Amino acid sequence: MAGIYIHIPFCKKACVYCDFHFSTSMKNKSELIDCINKEISEKKEYLGTKEINTIYFGGGTPSLLTKEELLSILSTIQSDYEVLSNAEITLEANPDDLNKQKLKEIKDCGVNRLSIGIQSFVARDLAFMNRSHTILQATNAIKYAKEVGFNNLTIDLIYGIPSLTEQEWIRNIKKALALDVNHISAYCLTSEERTAMHSDISKGKYELPSEEVTSKQFEILVQMLSDNGYEHYEISNFSKKGHHSKHNSSYWKQTHFLGVGPSAHSFNGKTRRWNVANNARYIKGARENNWIAEEEELDEKTRYNEYVMTSLRTSWGIDLGYIKDNFEPKFAIHFVKESKRFILDNSLVQAGNNYTLSQSGKLLADRISSELFWVD
């Protein structure tokens, strides 16, 4: 089985922190959707299987798609692949796009999981991030989604915002809990190059909070969600029982996926491909049957490092048996040697062949991963 990711590169406005590929101009939207459908059909041999168990519309802002556009993409996938009857079909959405009629249309198209970009329930922070929705729109979006029959909902929250106080963060989490969604993704705000926020920080307009502040907010998040029945199954992801994101989990479990649309990435176990991050060039390539993309052959070192990086972030962790079965013996020897100090300082927990991060280790996930990497 495999997954398909569709990148919808359009937004109403630019959030200050976002470095994903998008355009605020919709003039080529219809043509680009046609090209996405063409790519879905022409790339069907990449995965080596036709069985699809996850479809994910990301962006950008997929909720800007019309019912007809969404149906056309899903119909193309249905025509060229075998979509399992229990496939998870997720669409990312902004709250200001979601009235009851829009939600009914999305559901009628076959979408069964909705990812709503809430980010914050503090109006000041929404303005800082240049979000296009209000708090009322955010709460109504969740309420309306439930009313039209969506029972698989996830929301995004962001911490580490410069003005966000500890008490405001606690209220954000309480608000999310009161809305009773079954999945929450929470990310620490970071400054990425080529974003408005990075420019403002470089000009000294403001600073991001210290690691001490963001670590405390992370600890509050973990404690409050754990106390309310959420499983912390990946560093940034929490779910009630039975509501892990199947699509994202497939990334962390090295499942193959096809990415279509500008900037979309694909992975088939042997290679990783990524499309050009430019709408006009993507369309031109599709017209000329000359898809503009880069491809990387994954050597053993790269595959090992990716396995360590992704698996360590999850609740199921790293399986030493998997390393032994899938890589040369030197990689298992290296992993056991380098992991010992993290076990001794209680950052890593070993149970047989299984290695997972401790609660304190989750604060150091990136550093621990880098120390476990194979470096030539």
Image: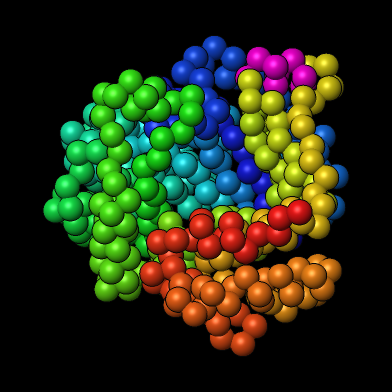
**In the image, farthest residue toward the top:** 27
Where residue 363 sits in the image (x, y, percent)?
Answer: 40, 61
Asked which quadrant contains residue 14, the reply is top left
Vertical placement of 51 versus 129: above or below?
Answer: below
Residue at 53 percent across and 39 percent down: it is 58
Task: Name the residue at the bottom extreme.
Answer: 352
Q: Main secondary structure of the magenta part?
A: helix
| Residue 328 image point, x, y percent | 84, 69
Residue placed most toward the observer, 90 or 320: 320
Residue 188 versus residue 318 in the image, above or below: above
- At x 54%, y 12%, the residue is 27
From where the camera sits, is residue 197 visible? yes
Residue interval drawn in magenta = 279-286
Say if the magenta span includes residue 211: no
At 32% from the left and 51% from the top, the residue drawn is 211
- Residue that lies at the very extreme toward the left in this rendered image: 167
Q: How many marks?
A: 0
Q: Is residue 358 above or below residue 251?
A: below
214 vs 66, left or right, is: left
> x, y (%) of residue 158?
33, 46
- In the rendered structure, does residue 282 fall within the stretch colored magenta? yes
Quarter of the picture holding the C terminus: bottom right
Q: In the picture, residue 350 is in which quadrant?
A: bottom right
Residue nearest the observer in this picture, 372 or 26: 372
**Residue 250 visible in the current orientation:** no
